[in-house]
Image (cartoon, rainbow, N blue to C red):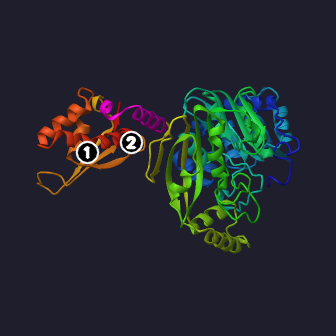
Amino acid sequence: MSPETGPAAGPSAAAGPSVDTGLAGRLGEALGAAGFTHDGVADLLGTTAHAALGRSETTPALRRTAGGSPLETLTRLFLLQTPVRLEAAEAALSGSGGRPGGDGRRGLLDRLCAAGILERSVGEVAARLDCRPYADDERDLWVVSDLTPGLDGLPGTVGRDHVLGISGASTSLAQLTLREPVDAALDLGTGCGVQALHLAAHSRRVVATDVNARALWMAGFNAALNGLGADRVDVRDGSFFEPVRDERFDLIATNPPFVISPATGERLVYRDSGLPGDRVVEDIVRAAPGHLTPGGWCQVLANWAVRDDQPWEERLADWVRDCDAWVVRREVVDPAAYVELWLKDAGLHGHPDYLDRYDTWLAWFEEQGIEAVGFGWINLRRTDQVPRLRWEEWPWEVEQPIAPTVRAWAEAVRMLDRTDDESLLASHLVARSDVRQETVGAPGAEDPHTIVLRQQRGLRRARKADTVEAALVGACDGDLSVGRILEALAGLLEVDAAGARTAYLPVVRELVEEGFLEA
């Protein structure tokens, strides 16, 4: 059943985000008692069926869940979107592992149906919302969202107020976000509240905002489902920073509705802001400093236009004020591939309007001078000093979570700002333990023609180095100062020591900023 065809999704926009916390708590107890956790489901399905479900194919998982246990029943009901027998659903939700005598079995089922999470027909129960096990490093969690569209290749058109569940984008942002204790955090455009759940683990209080009333209800329900009261996760209705107009935060995490489109056709709230081009990302970047405490961070998962009249770095640099910024472009997509991606995301592939929408979108890109779309991370750190800006193209695999690398970059650049050349020469730097040296050369050659320094962790950077740079990194074990190492290398190579210092001090600064050397 479509989200628009019944009362399945919590309150209407007028009702606001009222949540039955008692119902959420009872559901969480029942899910936990049934072993309906991320690891529990993965073990039940096995590698093949679990991977197939990740590709939206349910047949292998259906074959693995026919035994009728509470875990199998809940997996079929919520994850495979398959109706189950009424008796099996009651047993699975009994909170007693399916044993007779569970507390309020029928009462919980009735309340879930009344809330629009389940629906009951003669002898069967079906899910109207997805309830998915999730986990972080320390906790088993559950996330309620709209049903996953397009399972098994079936038509998957989504409605305007569709609330997306756990996705690749939400996982990417969770891996990017810094995980250090803070007083106040903001989940801007919370959707079903995944980021708010993560933030609540290390924030005294979290504010979560959205304009979608259904999303706000789900975010509030998910907080209660995972034992978080309104004092920990404060869900507010409003567009972007409007609900927190006079507030500042130590950490802002946002996966905004960043799709760049001509805003024709139906707007999907979870991905379409209604603003032209990449204006939504620009507005967030420009406004964020006014909502950050000194040293506070704003981390944005973003799309931005790559125009034919200006380098992308220049466009984004004009948006940044009063913040250090590290922007990493992870991917560049050509207009045709971008349009295809988002039309299919909306379930419009094969729709009668598909070709017209495709052509309209491409024509709009041409009119706007957009030659590609960039996707990546924007990390902003509020500063009262001269901002440090770094723009980087990095489409390769990285270690996850990547957040520690973001923190290490910020600490490195601020250390460099405090360190003049004489102090840097006197410093005792250490090569990061995961850095490896690779050499390439003809067999039997005395010297390699290429030396590469490569990190095994974090961003896994690689950089070409000459003999002096490689030897410098190799000698940085904390015993000798940078100046002494350069003097020794100059003597070995019979070059002027002053010239070596002048030539390689900028290289040392690069090696520190890129994480090859640490203080």
User: Which residue is disc 1 drawn over?
Assistant: 503
Q: Estimate the x, y position of residue 350 in percent, counting from the top left.
A: 69, 70
User: Which residue is disc 2 drawn over?
Assistant: 514
- Secondary structure, mark 2, is loop
Task: Name the kind of residue labelled 2 in the image.
Answer: Glu
Between 427 and 27, the one lying in front of the other is 427
Foreground label between 1 and 2: 1
- Residue 122 visible in the snapshot: no
Count of marks overlaid on the render: 2
Left or right for 52, reference 507: right
Toward which corner of the image does residue 454 lie, by quadrant?
top left
Q: Estimate the x, y position of residue 31 in percent, counting from the top left.
A: 70, 33
The verdict on residue 486 being magenta is no
- Residue 315 visible in the snapshot: yes
The residue drawn where x is 71% and y is 57% is 275
The residue drawn where x is 66% and y is 64% is 343
The residue drawn where x is 35% and y is 43% is 510
The verdict on residue 416 being magenta is yes
Quarter containing the N terminus: bottom right
How many residues crowd around disc 1 within 10 Å: few (fewer than 14), some, or many (20 or more)? few
- Secondary structure, mark 1, is helix
Q: Estimate the x, y position of residue 65 in percent, counting from the top left.
A: 64, 45
Q: Estimate the x, y position of residue 219 in percent, counting from the top left.
A: 73, 38
Name which of mark 1 and mark 2 comes first in the sequence.
Answer: 1
Query: Is 98 above or below relative to 506?
Result: above
Quarter containing the C terminus: top left
Between 348 and 379, the one lying in front of the other is 379
- Range drawn in magenta: 404-424
Q: CA distance from mark 1 to mark 2?
A: 18 Å
- Residue 140 is marked as none
How many residues crowd around disc 2 within 10 Å: few (fewer than 14), some, or many (20 or more)? many
Task: Name the kind of residue labelled 1 in the image.
Answer: Ala
